[in-house]
Amino acid sequence: MTKSKALSVATITAVLLAACTSEAPENWGVLVDDQWIPVFDLHTHTGEWDQMPPGFKNRLSERVPRGFKWSMGGATDWMLGTENILSQMNSAGIYGAGVFALYSPHTTGNAPNEFVAEKIAGHTDRLYGFASLRVDRWNQDSKQQLAALESALTDLPGMVGIKLAHGHQQFRFDDERFYPIYEIAGRLQKPMYLHTGTSPNPGTRFEPPYADPLYLEDAIKRYPDAIFILGHAGYDSKEKALNYTDSAIYLAKNYPNVYMEPGALGADRAEDVIDDFVTRVKENGVLNKVIYGSDGVQFPGYLKSHLEAYVAAMQRNGYTADEMRAVLSGNFSRVFGIQAPDNRAVAAAAAGE
Amino acid sequence: MQNGIFDLRQLAVPALLAMTLSACSDMPEEKFATVTLNGTVQMAAGPMPPGALHFRLYNLESLEGELQHALQEIEDFDSDSPVFSHTFEYPLHMGTGLAVHAWIDTDGDGIFCTPTSRLDASGLAYTETTPEGEVDMTITLSANCRAANWFYPPMR
């Protein structure tokens, strides 16, 4: 990097830091009916520019004017860094968040397990790692990949679950060669987050065998000890439609080991479907199966704006405070055994009581 | 805090503009080669059932280092006949080799197998040679409902 570029990157970073750094709030959570409801965000990403393939870099670079594309590397690394994730969480009042490993060289790139462990190190009270594995040479290295996953889940500090993205990683939901992953999840009691629905990211598979969670039903039945969290709850982000949401609801309603996560449904892109979504899950009686997540951090202020949009949608559609509590933190705490601190206890501690 | 942001942004704008002049990208330069694939599809056993054939083309191997991976999608096309010819732009900048995955829509539902309908036969042909000009390939449909990565890389 040239000296002038380094200066510019440093300046941009300083601007972003000054604009976005946020201390821990006085109260964690969101205020509803005079109650502070704790919030966990199941779904955030870390990563680095150098581990992203060209198509995804191009997509990210579309967010900046043509002459500024060179700045995307530094800006992306900063955006996906630990300090920014925590800062966005603080700003939104979110106490804890899942941070996902990725092995999607076809689409969004790699964020290896060890990289995630480094990113959450020192913050495992608030950042919870989800390990993943490569699947693109499964016929040849599945044993090694499964062993590496198991090792990451048992040896790396702070790993609470497994992240899979069949559409990004290009493997069908109904391909039984991959069922040993679910066996590990059940045996080690590490809940799995599985991306369902589609994605606007280039190279992602969007056909039903990669998007419709109904294709997972056989695996869900065969591995009752494994928890399947259906990421994005079947939201077809490519078409901006709830095309596979009813499948997710059906599975969550009928199988005790199935949950849903509404990541990206609080984004601007989904503003036309969010009311339909929160209504469908409420009317179908599966609010005890919805675990809040955002798919952040994406851009400055995303975690907060996504949370505000989702809370507003729940309020518009008649959710009680107890129902909101279940979605925003109760179901997460039940599945992962992680509790948010009580605001009064935090205040008392701060006051030295 | 607000004043501080304003001051920093004032500094950033001219710096960013200056950088624009020397802007460069770490994206690979895109390079394509026009390739015509002449293909034949056959069943591993028995006669070819009726149904539309769906194809997907891939770079057999793509990118380098930690990002190197098998089977990077190029494009899709369809054919009503098991003997076909298809011309496409092969992305040289994305990798090497060529793989062609095919499946036949035996049940006519337009979906490559559903949880309850498992009739659509599939197969893959590949070459490690980066294609040029005209390429001849025969794809044998040998297993139902299998994605390209079921066939490649092969079992050791």
Image (cartoon, coloured by chain):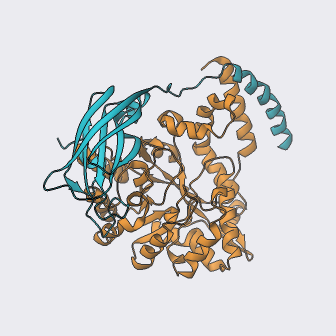
Chain colours: A orange, B cyan
Please, is residue A325 above or below residue A29 in the view? below
Please, is residue A113 above or below residue B105 in the view? above
Please, is residue B94 above or below residue A334 in the view? above
Residue located at (70% from left, 60% from top):
A350
- Give A160 or A289, whichever is nearer the viewer: A289
x and y, in percent, of residue A310 in the image: 65, 66
Question: Is B114 situated left or right of A144 in this image?
Answer: right
Question: Is A304 situated left or right of B65 in this image?
Answer: right
- Give A19 or A317, whichever is nearer the viewer: A317
Number of marks in the image?
0
Quadrant assignment for the C terminus of chain B: top left
x and y, in percent, of residue A271 in the image: 67, 62
Residue located at (57% from left, 43% from top):
A80
Please, is residue A238 above or below residue A333 in the view? above
x and y, in percent, of residue A252 in the image: 44, 74
x and y, in percent, of residue B17 in the image: 75, 25
Can residue A147 be seen? no
- Give B11 or A138, whichever is nearer the viewer: A138
Q: Residue furthest right?
A: B3
Can residue A306 be seen? yes
